[in-house]
Amino acid sequence: MWVFSILFPALNAPVSSTIGLSASSISLGVIVAVLGVFEFRRANTTVDPRFPDKSSRLVVSGVYRISRNPMYLGFFLVLFGWAWYLMNYLAFLLLPLFVVYMNCFQIQPEERYMAQKFGDEFDKYAARVRRWI
Protein backbone atom coordinates (compact mmCIF):
# COMPACT_ATOMS: atom_id res chain seq x y z
CA MET A 1 0.00 0.00 0.00
CA TRP A 2 2.75 2.39 0.94
CA VAL A 3 4.67 1.58 -2.26
CA PHE A 4 1.56 2.29 -4.35
CA SER A 5 1.10 5.62 -2.62
CA ILE A 6 4.73 6.51 -3.46
CA LEU A 7 4.70 5.19 -7.04
CA PHE A 8 1.28 6.58 -7.95
CA PRO A 9 0.84 9.89 -6.09
CA ALA A 10 -1.68 11.04 -8.71
CA LEU A 11 -4.04 8.41 -7.25
CA ASN A 12 -3.90 9.94 -3.77
CA ALA A 13 -7.25 11.32 -2.64
CA PRO A 14 -7.25 15.01 -1.72
CA VAL A 15 -8.17 14.56 1.94
CA SER A 16 -6.45 16.70 4.53
CA SER A 17 -7.14 14.86 7.79
CA THR A 18 -7.03 11.07 7.88
CA ILE A 19 -5.38 10.40 11.22
CA GLY A 20 -8.55 10.06 13.36
CA LEU A 21 -10.34 7.34 11.41
CA SER A 22 -7.05 5.69 10.56
CA ALA A 23 -5.93 5.48 14.18
CA SER A 24 -9.38 4.29 15.27
CA SER A 25 -9.47 1.51 12.67
CA ILE A 26 -5.93 0.38 13.45
CA SER A 27 -6.62 0.43 17.19
CA LEU A 28 -9.85 -1.52 16.80
CA GLY A 29 -8.08 -4.02 14.54
CA VAL A 30 -5.32 -4.61 17.08
CA ILE A 31 -7.88 -5.02 19.88
CA VAL A 32 -10.00 -7.51 17.90
CA ALA A 33 -6.95 -9.56 16.87
CA VAL A 34 -5.54 -9.60 20.41
CA LEU A 35 -8.91 -10.66 21.81
CA GLY A 36 -8.88 -13.55 19.34
CA VAL A 37 -5.41 -14.62 20.47
CA PHE A 38 -6.48 -14.26 24.11
CA GLU A 39 -9.42 -16.65 23.60
CA PHE A 40 -7.15 -19.22 21.93
CA ARG A 41 -4.66 -18.96 24.79
CA ARG A 42 -7.45 -19.24 27.35
CA ALA A 43 -8.71 -22.39 25.61
CA ASN A 44 -5.13 -23.72 25.59
CA THR A 45 -5.08 -24.33 21.84
CA THR A 46 -2.77 -23.25 19.02
CA VAL A 47 -2.92 -19.81 17.47
CA ASP A 48 -0.69 -20.77 14.55
CA PRO A 49 -2.84 -21.26 11.43
CA ARG A 50 -0.07 -23.21 9.70
CA PHE A 51 -0.72 -26.16 12.01
CA PRO A 52 -4.49 -26.68 12.30
CA ASP A 53 -3.89 -30.29 13.34
CA LYS A 54 -2.61 -28.95 16.66
CA SER A 55 -6.03 -27.45 17.41
CA SER A 56 -7.24 -29.05 20.60
CA ARG A 57 -10.54 -27.17 21.03
CA LEU A 58 -13.13 -25.35 18.99
CA VAL A 59 -13.09 -21.81 20.37
CA VAL A 60 -16.57 -20.26 20.32
CA SER A 61 -16.41 -17.85 23.28
CA GLY A 62 -15.55 -14.18 23.59
CA VAL A 63 -14.96 -12.42 20.29
CA TYR A 64 -15.56 -15.74 18.49
CA ARG A 65 -19.27 -15.29 19.22
CA ILE A 66 -19.21 -12.39 16.73
CA SER A 67 -16.68 -13.56 14.12
CA ARG A 68 -15.22 -16.96 13.27
CA ASN A 69 -12.01 -15.18 12.26
CA PRO A 70 -11.40 -12.21 14.55
CA MET A 71 -7.64 -12.29 14.03
CA TYR A 72 -8.04 -11.95 10.26
CA LEU A 73 -10.76 -9.36 10.78
CA GLY A 74 -8.31 -7.46 12.99
CA PHE A 75 -5.65 -7.61 10.27
CA PHE A 76 -8.21 -6.30 7.78
CA LEU A 77 -9.09 -3.37 10.06
CA VAL A 78 -5.40 -2.52 10.46
CA LEU A 79 -4.95 -2.60 6.68
CA PHE A 80 -8.07 -0.47 6.21
CA GLY A 81 -6.69 2.06 8.69
CA TRP A 82 -3.37 2.11 6.85
CA ALA A 83 -5.12 2.57 3.49
CA TRP A 84 -7.21 5.39 4.99
CA TYR A 85 -4.07 7.07 6.31
CA LEU A 86 -2.37 6.81 2.89
CA MET A 87 -5.57 7.85 1.04
CA ASN A 88 -4.41 6.20 -2.15
CA TYR A 89 -7.05 4.58 -4.36
CA LEU A 90 -4.80 1.61 -5.21
CA ALA A 91 -4.26 0.95 -1.52
CA PHE A 92 -8.03 0.55 -1.11
CA LEU A 93 -8.12 -1.85 -4.06
CA LEU A 94 -5.80 -4.18 -2.17
CA LEU A 95 -8.36 -4.67 0.62
CA PRO A 96 -10.70 -6.94 -1.39
CA LEU A 97 -7.65 -8.88 -2.59
CA PHE A 98 -6.70 -9.49 1.04
CA VAL A 99 -10.20 -10.82 1.78
CA VAL A 100 -10.23 -13.09 -1.28
CA TYR A 101 -6.76 -14.41 -0.52
CA MET A 102 -7.56 -15.07 3.13
CA ASN A 103 -10.85 -16.78 2.24
CA CYS A 104 -9.32 -19.03 -0.40
CA PHE A 105 -5.92 -19.88 1.01
CA GLN A 106 -6.30 -19.58 4.76
CA ILE A 107 -9.88 -19.68 6.01
CA GLN A 108 -11.38 -22.34 3.74
CA PRO A 109 -8.58 -24.86 4.39
CA GLU A 110 -8.80 -24.16 8.13
CA GLU A 111 -12.56 -24.60 8.10
CA ARG A 112 -12.34 -27.87 6.16
CA TYR A 113 -10.02 -29.18 8.83
CA MET A 114 -12.21 -27.89 11.66
CA ALA A 115 -15.28 -29.52 10.09
CA GLN A 116 -13.40 -32.82 9.91
CA LYS A 117 -12.05 -32.61 13.43
CA PHE A 118 -15.07 -31.15 15.26
CA GLY A 119 -17.89 -32.34 12.97
CA ASP A 120 -21.39 -31.30 13.95
CA GLU A 121 -20.10 -28.94 16.65
CA PHE A 122 -18.26 -26.89 14.00
CA ASP A 123 -21.18 -27.05 11.56
CA LYS A 124 -23.55 -25.62 14.19
CA TYR A 125 -21.03 -22.92 15.08
CA ALA A 126 -20.47 -22.00 11.41
CA ALA A 127 -24.24 -21.76 10.89
CA ARG A 128 -24.56 -19.44 13.91
CA VAL A 129 -21.51 -17.15 13.46
CA ARG A 130 -20.45 -15.41 10.27
CA ARG A 131 -16.99 -15.85 8.79
CA TRP A 132 -15.91 -12.19 9.09
CA ILE A 133 -18.65 -10.17 10.85
Image: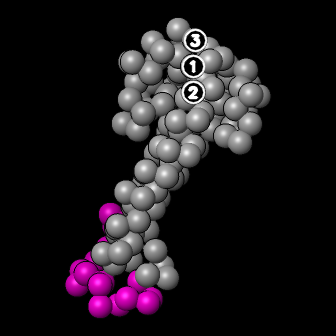
Image quarter (top left, top right, bottom left or bottom right) of the C terminus: top left
Separation of residues labelled 1 and 3 (CA atoms): 5 Å
Around disc 1, counting alpha carbons within 10 Å, would you say few (fewer than 14), some (14 to 19), or many (20 or more)?
A: some
Q: Give yes or no for contact between labels 1 and 3 (Cβ–Cβ under 8 Å).
A: yes
Q: Give yes or no for contact between labels 2 and 3 (Cβ–Cβ under 8 Å).
A: no
Q: In this view, does 102 lie above or below 45?
A: below
SS type, badge 2? helix
Q: Name the one closer to the observer, 13 or 20.
A: 13
Q: Where is residue 13 in the image (x, y as percent from the top left)?
A: 25, 81
Q: Give the range drawn in magenta.
A: 5-22
Q: Give yes or no for contact between labels 1 and 2 (Cβ–Cβ under 8 Å).
A: yes
Separation of residues labelled 1 and 2 (CA atoms): 5 Å
In the current view of this chain or complex, which residue is farthest to the top? Answer: 120
In the current view of this chain or complex, which residue is farthest to the left? Answer: 14
* Residue under label 2: 112
Q: Residue at x 53, y 38 (%)?
A: 107
Q: Name the one closer to the observer, 14 or 9.
A: 9
Would residue 10 be seen by someone viewing this image from the given angle? yes
SS type, badge 3? loop
Q: Name the one closer to the observer, 48 or 31.
A: 48
Q: Is residue 10 above or below residue 51?
A: below
Does the stretch in magenta take in 49?
no
For the residue marked with disc 3, what is the amino acid?
A: Gly
For the residue marked with disc 2, what is the amino acid?
A: Arg
Answer left or right for 24 relative to 36: left
Q: Which residue is drawn at 38% across and 29% down?
A: 130
Separation of residues labelled 2 and 3 (CA atoms): 10 Å
* Residue under label 1: 115
Quarter of image, res 6: bottom left
* Residue under label 3: 119
